[in-house]
């Protein structure tokens, strides 16, 4: 019996992982176009999907549409596994003690909200690297900044500003401005080298295409950067999870009732109706995924744009020290929306609806198809 249970669990886990990989690979080009439309658009110049596709194809070829697909596949496999696992645990708790396996719509919504929140925390690092790789595919081959020499700057500053060299022109101007003040130290230049924000002279962080790997992100921005935009991410995934499972449960109950109409005698419980068609289940999942993506898309745009913002560690420390107050109204501060992005929140909504709807349909359909064939055999 124990061996049979272990085999059944292994079959379900393998089927779930394979279905997520297939759904992600088939819809990944849509995700790449969606991210580039979100990140590259401005208030005065919104990008079209056709323009983004042409740019990626010219700079990186067709393979550029699949930049970062491995990170997204791994993140979605772990994230969806946790989402469905938490959802099943919560729904089992709701249905405990009932004669029927019927699940209320409100219970499905609450379980979906909770499972989406947990998924957001787990999949955030994978999504960060994936988004950076997608943006780099449309950025071309940009030259890397010069590498810092160990003798040029102190070790602490070199860790805060990797790949940057000393800008003597900016330092000379700063020394000229400070030369009129009382100098208590013998060498102003050595004193200025202790401050990271004085090194480059421009104050501009490197482009996203140069900070896209895990080591580069951690070195320049720190480990906490992997969870940047967590507020908008949690809101996005909780709304998506709640509406996806809620609408899917609603459509599932509609199909159960429709099937039970022609049965004689009328079934008392949903379990007596029998299994639904895998095609109908997968199509209902696709409709639910597209609907949930449309409602939560504004927060997805905010998350993608925040993940493409380079914020070095020394700037983060400055903001904490100065108790930096975020701009925007209370709702925007709570959800992580930047005021400058108010007119950009719906960019790429059609691409995300198509990707989420098609991916949900493929994942659910391939999962049920694999389970029916493997378990029956």
Image (spheres, rainbow, N blue to C red):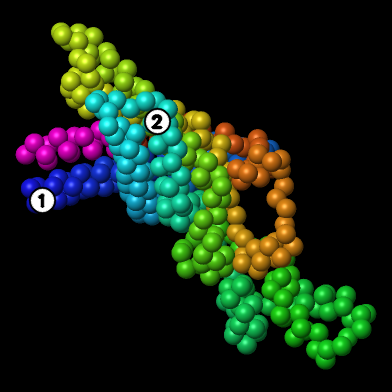
The image quadrant of residue 152 is bottom right
Q: Position of residue 260 (x, y in %)?
A: 22, 13
**Disc 2 residue crowd, few under 14, some 14–19, many 20+, Cα 10 Å:** some
| Foreground pick, 36 / 138 | 36
Seen from the viewer's position, the closer of residues 291 and 43 is: 291
Q: Which residues are magenta?
A: 362-377
Instruction: Place residue 281 in its image quadrant.
Output: top left
* 340 or 249: nearer the viewer: 249
Q: Position of residue 342 (x, y in %)?
A: 66, 37
Q: Could you tell whether 196 is left or right of 347 in the image?
A: right
Q: Is residue 287 visible?
A: no
Pointer 2 residue: 107
**98 relative to 44, above or below:** above
**270 horizontally vs 249: left or right:** left
Say if 128 sits above or below 360 in the image: below
What is the C-alpha distance between the residues marked 2 and 1? Answer: 32 Å
Q: Which residue is mark 1?
A: 2
Instruction: Using the image, tell me which numbered label, if any, was put on residue 187.
Output: none
Residue 165 covered by magenta stretch? no
Q: Magenta stretch mostly in which secondary structure?
A: helix
Residue located 48% across and 36% down the image: 239
The location of residue 232, given as percent across then percent down, is 55, 44
């Amino acid at each position: 019996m124990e061996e049979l249970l272990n085999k059944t669990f292994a079959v379900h886990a393998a089927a779930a992982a394979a279905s997520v990989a297939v759904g992600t690979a088939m819809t990944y080009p849509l995700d790449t176009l969606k991210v580039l439309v979100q990140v590259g658009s401005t208030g005065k110049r919104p990008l079209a999907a056709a323009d983004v596709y042409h740019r990626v194809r010219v700079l990186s070829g067709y393979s550029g549409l699949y930049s970062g697909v491995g990170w997204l596949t791994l993140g979605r496999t772990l994230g969806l596994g946790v989402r469905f696992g938490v959802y099943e645990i919560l729904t089992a708790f709701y249905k405990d003690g009932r004669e029927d396996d019927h699940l209320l719509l409100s219970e499905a919504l609450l379980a979906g909200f909770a499972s989406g929140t947990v998924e957001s925390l787990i999949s955030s690092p994978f999504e960060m690297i994936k988004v950076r790789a997608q943006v780099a595919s449309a950025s071309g081959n940009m030259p890397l900044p010069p590498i810092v020499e160990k003798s040029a700057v102190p070790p602490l500053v070199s860790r805060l500003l990797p790949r940057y060299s000393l800008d003597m022109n900016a330092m000379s101007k700063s020394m000229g401005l400070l030369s009129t003040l009382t100098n208590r130290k013998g060498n102003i230049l050595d004193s200025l080298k202790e401050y990271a924000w004085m090194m480059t002279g421009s104050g501009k962080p490197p482009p996203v295409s140069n900070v896209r790997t895990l080591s580069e992100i951690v070195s320049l921005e720190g480990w906490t950067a992997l969870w940047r935009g967590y507020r908008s991410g949690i809101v996005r995934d909780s709304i998506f999870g709640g509406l996806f499972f809620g609408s899917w449960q609603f459509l599932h109950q509609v199909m159960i009732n429709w099937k039970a109409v022609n049965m004689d005698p009328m079934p008392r419980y949903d379990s007596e109706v029998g299994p639904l068609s895998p095609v109908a289940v997968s199509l209902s999942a696709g409709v639910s995924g597209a609907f949930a993506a449309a409602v939560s898309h504004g927060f997805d745009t905010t998350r993608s744009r925040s993940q493409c913002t380079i914020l070095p560690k020394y700037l983060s420390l400055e903001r904490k020290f100065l108790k930096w107050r975020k701009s925007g109204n209370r709702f925007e501060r709570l959800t992580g929306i930047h005021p400058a992005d108010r007119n950009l929140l719906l960019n790429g909504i059609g691409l995300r609806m198509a990707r989420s709807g098609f991916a949900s349909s493929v994942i659910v359909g391939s999962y049920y198809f694999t389970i029916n064939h493997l378990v029956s055999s």
